[in-house]
Amino acid sequence: MSSSKKTVKDVTHSIFMKIQREEDERDIIDAINKHAENIDFDKTFGLFEDSLLTAALNNSLGKVVACILKFEKRANLGHVNKSGQTALLLACKHNFRNFALKILEYEKKCVPDEDGYTALMYTCGNEGMIDVTEHMIKHDVCDIGHVNESGDTALSLTLEVGNPRALTLLLDSGKSNPGMKDPKNPTVTLFEKTLSEEDVESAKMILEKTGMDCDPLNGTNEFGSTALMLAIPRHGGDDEPDYIDIIRMLLDFASKTKNKEYVNTRGGSGYCAFDLIFEYAAQNDEPINPHLIKLFLDYYYKNDQNSPAFLQNIDEICQDTVLYKAIKRVYPTKALKKIIKNACRNFHVAPASLVNPPSKSKSPEIYMGKRESAKRSTRKVLQEAEEIPIIHATSPVSPPIDSGFFVGDPRDRGIRQRKTRRRRGGILHKKK
């Protein structure tokens, strides 16, 4: 071997050892500048076969990295070490924004490391690297939908840390799948996870940008809850309008796919989505948002007029003067107001809520299927809201002996006639 080749090898190895020992960066830079012509940047050393650049990045020697990058393509930008790491991946992993952008000018190789993470997956978890993320997505540098052995994707990591700008870029690319199962909880999709964690802004963005592609009517999670149930706000707040938008979209999807079962699904606690509006309001002693009620009234009148979930909650509306008037105000025309007027046809004779307010927490029997399902006393099916006929039952329907409530046409009945009381074990007994 010639002396010149030995010199090149010795000089490169000497600089590599200085980097490994993390010596003073000024001394390393002086050595690089002094022996620049005799340095072989393609040479690799150590157990992981690092180049000078990957070694400097792994040891977070920023000034040394900047010095090596001045040699541009000669710096062996595309080298992959034994850990599957490239210079681009290491720059993204260690949050070297400027270095990553510099490397991307010459090298766009993007491969996952030994843990299955790509450069894009590292940047999506860091808002400070958003311009690097944007560059890699727009230029299709990395596989956006890559899934590692742990089930993580760029999208799942973005949602985990909360990076709305990266989320927008990923969804706009059309190559991310928010309908895939959450790697940490395979009973829910990534979309449902955002709702369960009350990340309403991300959930709304996913629905708006992906629609049915995110599988919003997926089914139920481990607790028996659907995305629609999770979208019912547990309390009032500034984010309530976003929840309302999500509910509107979910009900619209259910209507278009004729999925009545999804809307009427009862969770592990026995409540369906419509029930939860009243239950949460009672638990928190808060007024009910009439816009929430309107969404469900519109859905049920159009798709499922005799749904037990709908009929069981109508009397709650009809008995509450304040809620009834509030709901009427959210209907824009007189014709549309017939929806609520016909639901509470005899409302004017029913006791007002201030005189006889409903209990603050409904009995579980109402929701667990123990209450007799109410059916309209007339067989005529209701038409569109503007054409709903006003028909009175000739006689009330007698309730079963073990029923705790008067069951009849919801437009003809007044306040519930409670005849029983509940004791231990959920068994109903007549009052003495």
Image: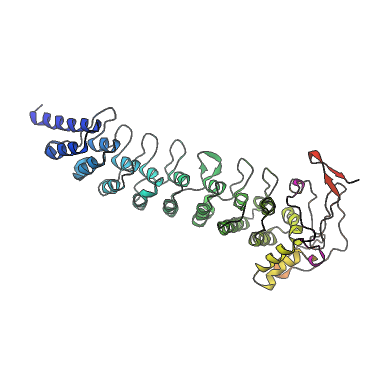
**Image quarter of residue 72:** top left
In the image, residue 98 lies at what x, y percent? 28, 48
Rendered position, 384 above or below 422: below
From the viewer's perspective, is 322 left or right of 114? right
Residue 23 percent location from the top left of the image: 22, 33
Residue 309 seen in this snapshot: yes
Residue 33 percent location from the top left of the image: 14, 40
Q: Quadrant of the N terminus?
A: top left
Q: Is residue 364 magenta?
A: yes
Position of residue 135 in the picture relative to residue 221 (left or right): left
- Residue plotted at (32% across, 40% down): 90
Q: Which residues are magenta?
A: 347-365
Identify the colour scheme used.
rainbow
Residue 384 visible in the current orientation: no
Q: Is residue 8 above or below residue 297?
A: above
> Residue 125: image x %, image y %?
41, 45
Q: Residue furthest bottom?
A: 334
What residue is at 25 percent from the left and 31 percent from the top? 20
Left or right: 351 as drawn, with respect to 15: right
Name above or below for residue 65 compared with residue 356. Answer: above
Query: Is 290 or 1 nearer to us in this picture?
Result: 290
